[in-house]
Amino acid sequence: MTTNKIWTKDFINLSAMNFFLILVYFLLNATITTYAVNEFDATAGESGLIAGIFIIGALVGRIITGRLVLSKKILMFGLFFFILTVLLYFLNLGIYFLMLTRFLNGISVGIATTIVGTVVALVIPNSRRGEGISYFAVSTALATGIGPFIGLLLTQNGNYNLIFLFSLVLGCIILGTSFIINVPQMPLESNVEKKSVFSNFIDYKTIPIAIILFIMTFSFSSILSYINLYATEMNLVSTASFFFMVYTASVLISRPFTGRLVDRKGANIIMYPAIVLFGLGMILLSFTESSMTLLLSGVLVGLGFGNITSITQTVAISQATPQRVAMATATFMIFYDLGNGFGPTLLGGIIPFTGYSGMYQILAVIIFLSLILYYFLHGRKAGIRQKQAV
């Protein structure tokens, strides 16, 4: 029976699973470099590799998952593999084994989050997809802020096994929840639709909007990686700890409304102002001298970037045929990971020349210029389709 409800049992369980997966992801990312230094005397380069190789693993996992025929067995296999890779953290077999563990853990997270993101897209009614994905994406936003907080809290006593145990418990909860999830049957793709070898791994229709996502996540990675160092430079460390709380609050308040607007009016009505707000937030961040301006920039970034991620995901899934929803989801997340992965490394190279303030100003310019890019890659066509629909 067809239903127009969003808050079904499956949607709630999938959102909870996504929350715990992303929470473990950011919890471990926030603490693993410190663990490597304290336990294995890792150098800065080795710590960077330990953190970054996870992204490479996630990319591999997403590429693999995009080619799989979605089923409940695949979902449970991915989550069981996730638990196994978390167990590897308990084995203290040297720094190279830790690198291998991070790589395998990245693959498992790539598989699990792609499958969960695909299944949730299939259980949301088409007529309310923008609203549904906006609600679902709140779980990611919450985990992004809570994960590092819990990780840093648990490391205060120096017992890293407590972090791994906490991650393992969450992994078991996620796996247990998967038993009561109904995975919709996804139609097989016909050979006629396969145009090249690359189309077996990447959904070409998703690439234009994914390019916009890449630019945005690349820019946002500067905040994730350097906000604390920037705040230290300005003697605003205590305020910086509230930045992501304000950011998360902005996302929670705005997404239900923006999701409904996208369903009724199309993506452009949110994307253009969201990009502008993100750029303004970065400008304000670059000129921050007080706690008030730092927190206000968090509000603007939340209203901007916080909505861009969910709207671009809605666009990516809506453009895909039913047979390629998994591949569209994988492509979307690959570009998301690339932005987060390459951002800190490349931006770290320009900070000695620009300073943190100058870096945020440069990124603000890039964000504003992406308005033009968005128009040509998606906005113009989306506007024409919306007028024709009216």
Image (cartoon, grey):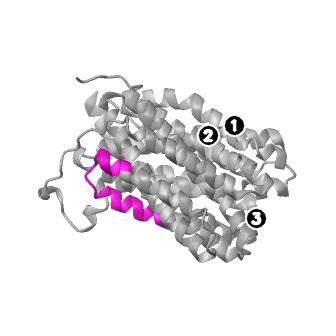
Q: Earlier in the sequence, mark 3 or mark 1?
A: 1
- Residue at disc 1, secondary structure: helix
Q: Secondary structure at mark 2?
A: helix
Q: Mark 1: which amino acid?
A: Val
Magenta-colored span: 57-76
| Residue that numbered label 3 is attached to | 355
> Which residue shows up at 39% across the image and 58% down it?
62
* Label 2 with label 1: CB-CB less than 8 Å: yes
Residue 345 part of the magenta-drawn span: no
Task: Locate the N terminus and report the quarter of the image it occupies.
Answer: top left
Mark 1 crowd level (few <14, some 14–19, many ≥20, 10 Å Cα): many
Query: Residue 353, labelled with which disc?
Result: none
**Disc 3 to disc 1, how far (Cα)?**
25 Å
> Is 70 colored magenta in this rendering?
yes
Q: Nearer the viewer, residue 231 or 373?
A: 231
**Residue assigned mark 2:** 302
Q: Quadrant of residue 260?
A: top left
Please tell me which of labels 2 and 1 falls first in the chain: 1
* Amino acid at dot 3: Gly
- Would residue 145 be seen by someone viewing this image from the given angle? yes
The residue singled out by tag 1 in the image is 246
Q: Nearer the viewer, residue 90 or 197?
A: 90
Dot 2 amino acid type: Gly
Label count reads 3
Query: Can I make out residue 269 in this image?
Result: no
Q: CA distance from mark 2 to mark 1?
A: 8 Å
- Residue 189 appears at what percent x and percent y? 18, 52
Q: Position of residue 139 (x, y in %)?
A: 53, 38
Q: Sort mark 3 into few (<14), some (14-19) or many (20+) by Cα contacts within 10 Å.
A: few
In the rendered image of this protein, does residue 222 appear above or below residue 40? above
